[in-house]
């Protein structure tokens, strides 16, 4: 059994080698901790900054065993980890956040049931398992609505909007006739996320709420402070506290919500959670003493949490595809902090980097 909390020089195993793994690895190194990345893709962005890397499939249980044996704790940078791989690791090493956080966030229906169970505000939804249940759900919820697969959907993938003219059989076919959730379409004013961290001892800290703008259902920009009334901003940590406490979650967790300015009863409606560091928290690298990445590492290593205090206002802008070719101009701009993920091919919609524009705290 590894010493606990993990002392400097210990190794944190991370499942997934994308930009989130890369930024987690950089944060770990600041604390004198090492990371070992497990990822199926060669040339994954996190490999550049990791002490060790394993390139293997998540279904390769002997590679999974070797990885688990070689590290002191295991965490992850994405939530669609196959359950068999996770169970296998859990027999060998502590996994944080827990399998429960992961299982709930892998399934949109379980997430929504959790919000209901905690009496947290969520727009009316219905379970869909067939074309018949879809017809019934649309009759109950009304149009417009959004049909989303229960599993494996992200950045707008696995979802289709149901308008007045939408043929339901086509819509169901468009999501691969998978089991799904029908969501009320929310005419929101803006989208908000809360980034919370819970330590292994149960201490909880929340960053200031973030206002997010999406383009083509992908995060384009995050702004802090969010342009929402103070009373609403102040209500957000309690929402996150209920969720992380119920899940006995350890590490970062993001709650994505819709802000509806004209809804006096429920101005915030929860959309979904992510049991990990999140794109809408990248600004914390430059505008806070301790970033979401470092706080996740601290939590899963059993360390005390770091300060979540924000020292300036900021706007974080994602660089996708060819956007990253602007790096020479961005690098010459004194008012921004530039982050590039070391990805070679600037494919469309591929997250290549981000920058944070900082300004005096208001
Ligand atoms: P999701 O995969 O649930 O995060 O959805 C991606 C994006 O689609 C969200 O960030 C919203 O911009 C939009 N969206 C998702 N669900 C709804 C909804 N129920 N009402 C309105 N817009 C939504």
Image: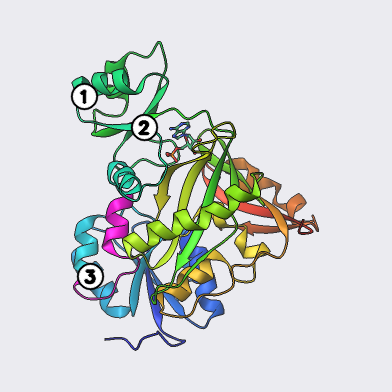
2 or 3: mark nearer the eye: 2
Q: Is residue 38 above or below residue 156?
A: below
Q: CA distance from mark 2 to mark 3?
A: 36 Å
1 or 2: mark nearer the eye: 2
**Rendered image: mark on residue 124:** 2
Q: Is residue 180 left or right of residue 249?
A: left
- The yes-or-no answer for disc 2 within 8 Å of ligand 1 is no
Q: Is residue 69 above or below residue 216?
A: below
Disc 3: which residue: 90
Looking at the rendering, the stretch of residues picked out in magenta corresponds to: 91-105
Comes first in the chain, label 3 or label 1: 3
Bin the neighbour count of mark 2 within 10 Å (Cα to Cα): few under 14, some 14-19, many 20 and up. Answer: some
Q: Residue at x 32, y 58 (%)?
A: 101
**Rendered image: mark on residue 82:** none
Dot 1: element: helix
Magenta segment: does it hold 92? Answer: yes
Locate the C terminus by quadrant: bottom right
Dot 3: element: helix
Place of residue 109 in the rendered image (x, y in percent of width and height, measured from the top left): 28, 41
The answer to whether any part of residue 344 appears in the image is no
């Amino acid at each position: 059994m590894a010493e606990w909390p993990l002392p400097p020089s210990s190794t944190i195993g991370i499942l997934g080698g994308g930009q989130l793994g890369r930024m987690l690895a950089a944060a770990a190194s600041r604390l004198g901790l090492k990371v070992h990345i497990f990822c199926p893709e060669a040339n994954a962005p996190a490999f550049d900054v990791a002490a060790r890397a394993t390139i293997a499939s998540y279904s390769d249980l002997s590679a999974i065993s070797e990885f688990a044996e070689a590290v002191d704790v295991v965490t992850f940078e994405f939530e669609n980890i196959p359950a068999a791989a996770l169970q296998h690791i859990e027999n060998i090493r502590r996994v944080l956040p827990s399998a429960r956080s992961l299982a709930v966030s892998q399934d949109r229906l379980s997430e929504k049931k959790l919000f209901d169970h905690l009496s947290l505000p969520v727009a009316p939804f219905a379970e869909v398992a067939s074309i018949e249940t879809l017809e019934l759900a649309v009759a109950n919820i009304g149009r417009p609505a959004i049909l989303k697969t229960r599993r494996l959907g992200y950045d707008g993938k696995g979802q289709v909007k149901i308008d007045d003219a939408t043929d339901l059989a086509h819509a169901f076919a468009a999501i691969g006739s998978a089991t799904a959730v029908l969501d009320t379409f929310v005419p929101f004013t803006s989208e908000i996320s809360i980034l919370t961290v819970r330590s292994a001892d149960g201490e909880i800290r929340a960053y200031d709420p973030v206002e997010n703008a999406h383009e083509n259902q992908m995060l384009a920009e995050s702004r802090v402070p969010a342009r929402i009334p103070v009373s609403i901003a102040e209500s957000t940590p309690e929402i996150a506290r209920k969720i992380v406490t119920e899940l006995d979650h350890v590490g970062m967790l993001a709650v994505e919500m819709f802000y509806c300015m004209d809804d006096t009863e429920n101005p915030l409606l929860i959309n979904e959670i992510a049991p990990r560091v999140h794109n809408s928290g990248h600004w914390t690298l430059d505008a806070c003493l301790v970033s979401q990445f470092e706080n996740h590492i601290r939590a899963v290593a059993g360390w005390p949490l770091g300060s979540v205090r924000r020292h300036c206002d900021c706007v974080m802008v994602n660089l996708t595809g060819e956007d990253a070719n602007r790096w020479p101009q961005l690098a010459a701009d004194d008012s921004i902090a530039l982050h590039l993920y070391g990805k070679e091919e600037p494919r469309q919609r591929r997250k290549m980097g981000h920058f944070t524009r900082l300004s005096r705290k208001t």
